[in-house]
């Protein structure tokens, strides 16, 4: 193995140093949020910026998990939306992308044009709201799932992946008597786990983080997802803190805010490392034509 020259070593060291600095800059906000959520208010006021707290308190988390804030109910709504919404989106995206990836589909170019058209233009906010209302989905979790059931961008990525699968596999399956649905479920899907995992994570993160559609379509407190409840907590945290002070509970404003942020992002942070490895592979395989 050829040894590196002094210049190459210096260049590699500079690249590693740059990556370390970028990682530190990206990691600092997350660390700060977690630290502030467990730091007493008096220490925050005294120091301003706290990286290593002198004392640790879990009062903010205990307060956030009480029933009056509705986080537990919001978690149930968001989990249902994420799990069911992601499953349905993956299913309908797959059964739409598969026929569009077959060149023998009659009118394939026209359907693809319709898909690409929706990536550039939409019906608008008010027509979408009127459609959701006319379908009777207001104040239901289905208003958060059905309107965004299929993403045109994800559909194009999955179609590109399906196009790269060997045609001979499908032809041999047809010789054995398999139909389109059998080929999709028994052959295409098992071979497409990287792109399915990637698109599934795209859908899951979108469902978990989305709040604007819930603000528009949901008006009942017991149907609001986690991000809307978090938004309300962050907006009303000062009045909430005044109530807590009246109850002689030592919970600070910033600790309440940061604990709510941590509780809302923790599930995604726990899941992401296990499927992150499929991200690059799945997107590249669906976007590069072989």
Image (tube, helix red, strand yellow):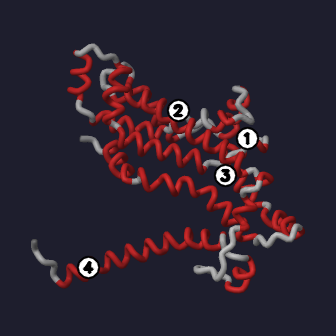
Does dot 3 land on a helix, a strand or a loop?
helix
Q: In this view, does 32 lie to the left or right of 112?
A: right
Task: Residue at 55% x, 71% y: name it.
Answer: 31
Q: Nearer the viewer, residue 216 or 221?
A: 221
**Label located before the other in sequence (3 or 2):** 2
**Element at label 4:** helix
Q: Residue at x 37, y 76 (%)?
A: 18
Q: Residue beneath label 3, please?
A: 227
- Badge 2 local density, few (<14 within 10 Å), some, or many (20+)? some
Farthest residue in the left direction?
1
Identify the residue under disc 1.
223
Q: What quarter of the picture does the C terminus occupy?
A: top left
Mark nearer the N terminus (2 vs 4): 4
Distance (Cα) linking label 1 and label 4: 55 Å
Which labelled disc corresponds to residue 88? 2
Q: Quadrant of the N terminus?
A: bottom left
The reply to whether the C-beta atoms of the residues labelled 2 and 4 are less than 8 Å apart is no
Residue where numbered disc 4 is placed? 11
Disc on res. 240: none
**Residue 173 position within the rendered picture, expressed as x and y whole percent measured from the top left:** 25, 20
CA distance for labels 3 and 2: 21 Å
Secondary-structure class at tag 2: helix
> Looking at the rendering, which quadrant does residue 243 occupy?
bottom right
Query: Label 2, label 4: how many angstroms apart (C-alpha)?
Result: 48 Å
Camera-nearest residue between 105 and 262: 262
Give x and y (percent) for residue 174. Answer: 26, 17
């Amino acid at each position: 193995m050829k040894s590196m020259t002094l210049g190459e070593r210096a260049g590699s060291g500079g690249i590693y140093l740059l990556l370390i600095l970028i990682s530190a800059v990206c990691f600092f906000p997350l660390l700060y949020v977690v630290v502030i959520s467990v730091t007493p208010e008096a220490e925050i006021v005294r120091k301003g910026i706290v990286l290593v707290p002198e004392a640790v308190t879990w009062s903010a988390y205990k307060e956030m998990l009480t029933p009056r804030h509705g986080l537990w109910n919001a978690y149930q709504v968001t989990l249902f939306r994420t799990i069911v919404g992601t499953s349905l989106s993956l299913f309908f995206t797959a059964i739409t992308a598969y026929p569009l990836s077959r060149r023998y589909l009659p009118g394939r170019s026209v359907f693809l044009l319709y898909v690409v058209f929706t990536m550039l233009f939409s019906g608008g906010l008010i027509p979408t709201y009127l459609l959701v209302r006319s379908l009777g989905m207001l104040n239901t979790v289905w208003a958060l799932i059905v309107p965004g059931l299929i993403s045109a961008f994800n559909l194009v990525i999955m179609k590109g992946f399906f196009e790269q699968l060997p045609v001979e596999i499908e032809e041999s399956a047809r010789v054995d008597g398999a139909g389109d649905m059998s080929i999709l479920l028994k052959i295409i899907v098992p071979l497409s786990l990287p792109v399915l995992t990637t698109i599934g994570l795209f859908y899951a993160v979108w469902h978990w983080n989305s709040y604007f559609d819930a603000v528009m379509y949901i008006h009942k407190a017991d149907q609001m997802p986690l991000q809307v409840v978090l938004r309300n907590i962050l907006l009303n945290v000062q009045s909430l803190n005044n109530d807590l002070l009246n109850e002689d509970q030592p919970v600070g404003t910033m600790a309440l805010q940061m604990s709510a942020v941590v509780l809302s992002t923790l599930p995604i942070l726990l899941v992401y490392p296990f499927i992150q490895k499929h991200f690059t592979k799945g997107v590249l395989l669906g976007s590069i034509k072989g």
